[in-house]
Image (cartoon, rainbow, N blue to C red):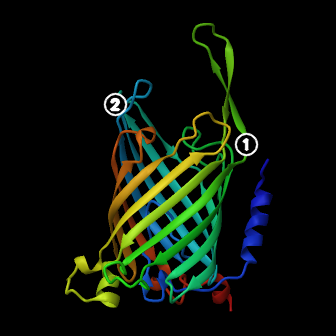
Amino acid sequence: MRTPSLLLAGFAALGTLPGAAVAHGLVGQRFFPATIATEDPFVADELALPTLSSVRNNGDAETPASRQTTIAVDFAKRITPDLAFSIGAAHQRFSFADQTRLRGFENVELGLKKLLYKDEAGEALVSAGLSWEIGGSGSRAIGERFDTYTPTVFFGKGFGNVASDWLRPFAVTGTLGVAIPGRSSTSSITVDPDTGLAVTQVERNPHVLQLGLALQYSIPYLQSAVKDIGLAAPWKNMVPVIELAAQRPLDRVDRRSWTGTVNPGVLWPGKYVQFGLEAVIPLNRASGHGVGVLAQLHFFLDDLFPQTVGRPLLAAAR
């Protein structure tokens, strides 16, 4: 139904849209840190290495309790000041209570993001992106065998222009996208243990609405733009954050409930590097029963190496 050529055509069309350049994470006086569970709206040269998560799944009548550990890396590179491509990969390991283990790589994901709108005074920006999960590029036991394409809108808004001083350090970022499977269904053949006959099983692959939100309170913004309350390190660099990452099937399945996680935590952005630590809490009963932890070390390459690898490719070519 969908092909890589369609995705590439979409990438090309996205690249022709008008946009505006922005320094890494800055809109007016507002610095937006890189969020962990949800994608931020910025176009930048950056490297997340590593992103670590460990989640306990309590299990149910059909599945034994387990622990899922994921190690991921994501790299983004600007083509122009307001257009960037990205590549991401992750390795998963499941350790089950019955002593069995499952491990392997997820599918590789490619992406393109373009900044469309920026308002310095309003501390606001909007970007559009397109990602391609390459089916079959990961381990057979972990990754899907079909491609998935996800057009997404990204936004960010700071509250710096509101009248109340206590609200001004707040900001929100978010994403809204639809994951489009390359196949409407997937067939597999199993053997019935009672009859010994081969049985064909068909799994429907739905379109999936994906929603991400991050509410953050910037203590650096409080100190520099509202009122210096005299906090010292490490408190003066803290950005408490609550993230929501949720999804809901839109068709082809009977159960279409929301699933996802709520991730409260803290980000410590510096000039060149950021560290983040968050809890992973199921959004509802349908999302599971275990909790976990999420941590990330994030490098701002455009600030670390502004004259070399941190420059846009076309600017470097000139």
Number of labels in the image equals: 2
Give the side of residue 193 with respect to residue 4, left or right: left
The residue beneath circle 2 is: 97
- Position of residue 59 relative to residue 195, above or below, is below
Residue at disc 2, secondary structure? loop
Indicate the position of residue 291 as horizontal and vertical percent values. 33, 46
Q: Which amino acid is tagged 1?
A: Arg
| Near-viewer residue (228 or 280) | 228
Numbered badge on residue 281: none
Would residue 101 be visible to someone looking at this image? yes
Could you tell me which secondary element the residue under label 1 belongs to? Answer: loop
Q: Distance between the residues labelled 2 and 1?
A: 34 Å
Q: Which residue is drawn at 51% across and 74% down?
A: 156
- For this view, does 12 lie left or right of residue 127? right
In this view, 130 is above or below 218? above
Which of labels 2 and 1 is toward the front? 1
Q: In which quarter of the image is the C terminus?
A: bottom right
Quick one: 117 or 316, which is closer to the camera?
117
Query: Which of marks 1 and 2 precedes in the sequence?
Result: 2
Front in this rendered view, residue 65 or 227: 227
Q: Residue at label 1?
A: 183
Local packing at callout 2 (Cα closer than 10 Å; few below 14, some 14-19, many 20+) is some
Residue 159 x %, y %: 43, 79
Relative to residue 289, is residue 276 depicted above or below? Answer: below
